[in-house]
Image (cartoon, coloured by chain):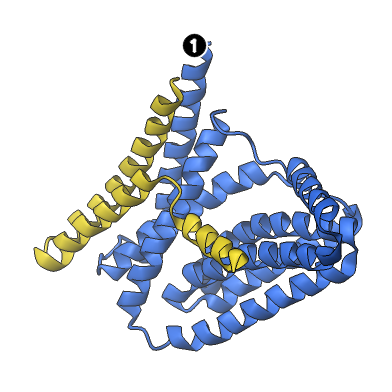
Chain colours: A yellow, B blue
Amino acid sequence: MRTVAAILRELFGLFVDDGALAILALLVVAIAALLAVGLHADNRITGAVLVAGSVASLLFSVFKAIRKNGS
Amino acid sequence: MTTIWATAAPAVSASFLASLVEMVEAFTIVLVVGTVQGWKPALSGSLAALLLLAILIAVLGPALGHIPLHVLQLVIGVLLLLFGLRWLRKAILRAAGLLALHDEASAFAREDSRLRAAAARDERHLDWIAGLAAFKAVTLEGVEVVFIVIAVGAGRGLVGWATLGAFAAFLLVLAAGLMVRGPLTRVPENALKFVVGIMLSAFGVFWTGEGLSVQWPGNEATIPFLVLLFLVTGLGSAGLLRSKARSAA
């Protein structure tokens, strides 16, 4: 049972390591989905939000790790 | 043939490189089990894990065919984005010197002492503990391989090609393992993880967009552009962090 729990915990960890990064990435997808489905925005805008948002989420998470490390 | 290969190449290479990293990690644990406790628990644990993975594929494979393509692309895209960004973040922090580099020799030593300590505590169940260690390692790394193969292949019907990439990685690790008979420390895992993080993040953005009906300029031709963007972001931020750390020292 402990092995199954450990496997499930590690499976979750495959996708979520830094919680803030996961939340930001999901937020970006939610905004892109709102633009595409809710507001029927030009899909170039949706694509741009997705690309820029993903890169921004990554950079935020990386620089947050540095602040945490005190560098 | 050139057109098929041009479409399949990103999926095959992403699957090959990601699987290579995962299989090297699984190989290290199986090798420890084989070395410490013998090849019977190592191989039976690994085979049980492979059987579980085969069942998973047999169940998931046909089920995927029933999911509408846009939903499949969106779900896979989001999971791939989370998975890829996580890998890339860690790779950047490793390249910048803020996280310890992954090292198969120390992974081997860690698992070796863990197994020997277990042997000292509970000798009766040692075969079981050792087999379980191999089972867990092959299952976890195998699930990642299965996910990557499905994720990079399913959106465009390229699962067969992606499987080919994973199988090539399996054969390569097996051949290298048989030759080296030790942890595969010379595989540049950290660099590979950087590249794989970039590729999976690019695929994640692409498939999420496809799932949301984004018409990417040039369709799949956008993937190399996304790869380049994440490459520049990754190398740029790692370089910036390294120089900040140097000037702070």
**Residue type at numbered disc 1:** Ser
Task: Answer yes or no: is residue B200 visible.
Answer: no
Residue B230 drawn at (x, y percent): 43, 44
A42 left or right, relative to A60 = left
Instruction: Name the residue at 43% across, 61% down.
Output: B80
Residue B166 drawn at (x, y percent): 65, 68
> Residue extending furthest left?
A39
Instruction: Name the residue at 12% across, 61% down.
Output: A41
- Judge by depth and name the residue closer to the eye, B134 or B161: B134
Residue B118 drawn at (x, y percent): 79, 53
Q: Chain of mark 1?
A: B
- Judge by depth and name the residue closer to the eye, A45 or A5: A5
- Judge by depth and name the residue closer to the eye, B223 or A30: A30
Res B207 → quadrant: bottom left
Residue B52 lies, with reference to residue B232, above or below; the image says: below
Mark 1 lies on residue: B247
Residue B197 drawn at (x, y percent): 51, 50
A69 left or right, relative to A5 = left
Instruction: Name the residue at 57% across, 80% down.
Output: B56
Res B37 → quadrant: bottom right
Other-residue count near label 1 (Cα within 10 Å), few / some / many at <14 / 14–19 / ≥20: few
A3 left or right, relative to B32 = left
Instruction: Name the residue at 51% across, 48% down.
Output: B87
Task: Answer yes or no: is residue A29 visible.
Answer: yes
**Quadrant of the rendering where the N terminus of chain B is positioned:** bottom right
- Judge by depth and name the residue closer to the eye, A7 or B210: A7
Residue A66 lies, with reference to residue B152, above or below; the image says: above
